[in-house]
Amino acid sequence: MRKRDLVFVAGHQRPDTDAAVAATVLARLRRRQDRRRRYLPILLGEANRQTRWLFKQTRIKLPEIRGDIRWTVGEAMSAEIFSLPPEARLGDAMEILQQKRISMVPVADQDGRLLGVVSPRLPQNEYFFNFNVEDYLGHLLSLEDVIATFELRTLKSAKTGPAAVMPGSFRVAGGGQLSIDRGDVVMAVASTKVVREAERAGAQAIILADASREDAKLATKASRNLPVYYYSGSLLALLSSLSLAIPLRTIMSGDGVRLTADQRLDRALPSLQQSLHALPVVDADDRLVGVLSHHQALAPEKRFLILVDHFERTQTVKGVDAARIEEIVDHHRVGGIETLMPARVDCRPVGSSATIVALQFEEAGLTPTADEAKLLLGALISDTLLLTSPTTTEIDRKLAPKLAKLAGVKLKAFGRELLAQNDELADGESDQLVQKDVKAFTRGEVGFGVAQLETVDLGILTVKRARELSAALEQLRRQSGWDSATLIVTDVVRGDSRLLVVDSDADRAVHLSGGEQDERGRLCPGMVSRKKQLLPLLYERLDRYAG
């Protein structure tokens, strides 16, 4: 699946049941209609208690929470990892670099934890990738490293242990005066004289090259206790490729930048741009999970997005500016969202966005599964307060029994149980309740929020509880930078509500509430709908107050 085939389906911030269900079931419908793309529903915040309960009645999982659809490092990186252990050789790393055409190789322990990286682009590594090594024995590599890397044949081993206690350097005998220090490893053309001189000087060992194995064996006879090894190639080839035997642990860079998969890609770009090579990506335990290259990070493709249950820019997902909106499905007023390209818009005056999704099933000649029908019914009931809200249409009333039949539930019993799940008025935390279902709006110069809380009994809203909610609402107003904030507490059984209004302008608060509030807010008989009843009323009162 290509990354550009991913389409996010997102409801609004602080999602209610209708937003969560519409995103989930619409994504499932689109998958049936278009198998070439992946439709991923997301929530922009935590699901409320009612929504969690509804999804538990089905075998469908709640969508993942993701409030930002901008690219992450994890989405752009390559999860194909070509790491090596610290015991591996530089030659192993060079082979991977050449075959995979990558700029660096991560070094990780047996548990996958990142230890460092090696790269020909690093100044401290560049020399070893391109030139031979002569004077670093004991610091970068050992005789054992060379023996293992080049599969040297042992012609003579030491009788009484190593010839030298301290490792020295590699020395090349190629004619003329040979200078050998104690502990050196000598590399030379097969010669009895060189073998004898190396042993006399206290060399650690000698490697013979540029000779047949028979000639090398003849030269070995000059050794009494000096280990002698045989390399079947030329001396020049051995010298020029000696650096391939260097263990990665001795030259890796362990203090470089590391990225995490959940980082936003645009925030990781400065680090990548300053780096000479691709950067490793690790998890919380420092285990390697991927590699991000410059090519992968540059010019990421636009996101594809379907919006449901909202038309307001202030309510939508972060990253919408960098996305291509393909579709909007909503039952609210047309708000301030703009699209770069033409988009399919299905905005109908019905009781819920779930109603529109259910109608799209019918129009496509498809039938929701029992679980999908249960979700759609639950969202319809939630938004229409069991078909009692003024937003309820004849379409909703006809559709609800059909969905109940498909879901295998009794409409009224299921609806009452669903609505009861949302009643947190008595014991919920005040600051959480006012943020549970709040939407932001603007009218002229005034920015304001409207929250709604449902209950099965307005009597639960005591004077003490009303004061707590008002204080939490005022705190939310200040934090959000709004001029005003209103909470509508709705009795879903009797169909009445109480309004709590806070405002930076005390006179405007009185005007918006419709008069002086009592200690439990202002009673509004017959008001249950934020969208169809309260919001138009607030717009009208704001216009009058401004005028």
Image: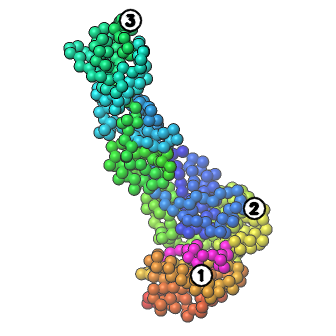
Q: In the rendered view, would you say 182 is above or below 530?
A: above
Q: Which residue is mark 2?
A: 407
Q: Could you say which disc has been placed on residue 259 in the image?
A: none
Residue 451 visible from this viewpoint:
yes
Instruction: Label 3: state its secondary structure.
Output: helix
> N-terminal of the two: label 1 or label 3?
3
Residue 524 visible from this viewpoint:
no
Mark 1 → mark 3, Cα distance in angstroms: 99 Å
Outermost residue, left direction?
A: 176
Residue range corresponding to the magenta coloring: 422-442
On the picture, is 508 further left or further right than 194?
right
Query: Label 3: few (<14), some or many (≥20) within 10 Å?
Result: few
Q: Nearer the viewer, mark 2 or mark 1?
A: 1
Q: Amino acid at mark 3?
A: Glu
Instruction: Label 1: state its secondary structure.
Output: strand
Q: Amino acid at mark 1?
A: Ile
Q: Which residue is mark 3?
A: 214
Asked whether residue 526 is drawn in magenta, I would say no
On the picture, is 459 further left or further right than 104?
right
- Residue placed at 62% from the left, 77% from the top? 453
Q: Residue 332 placed where, x, y %?
A: 57, 72
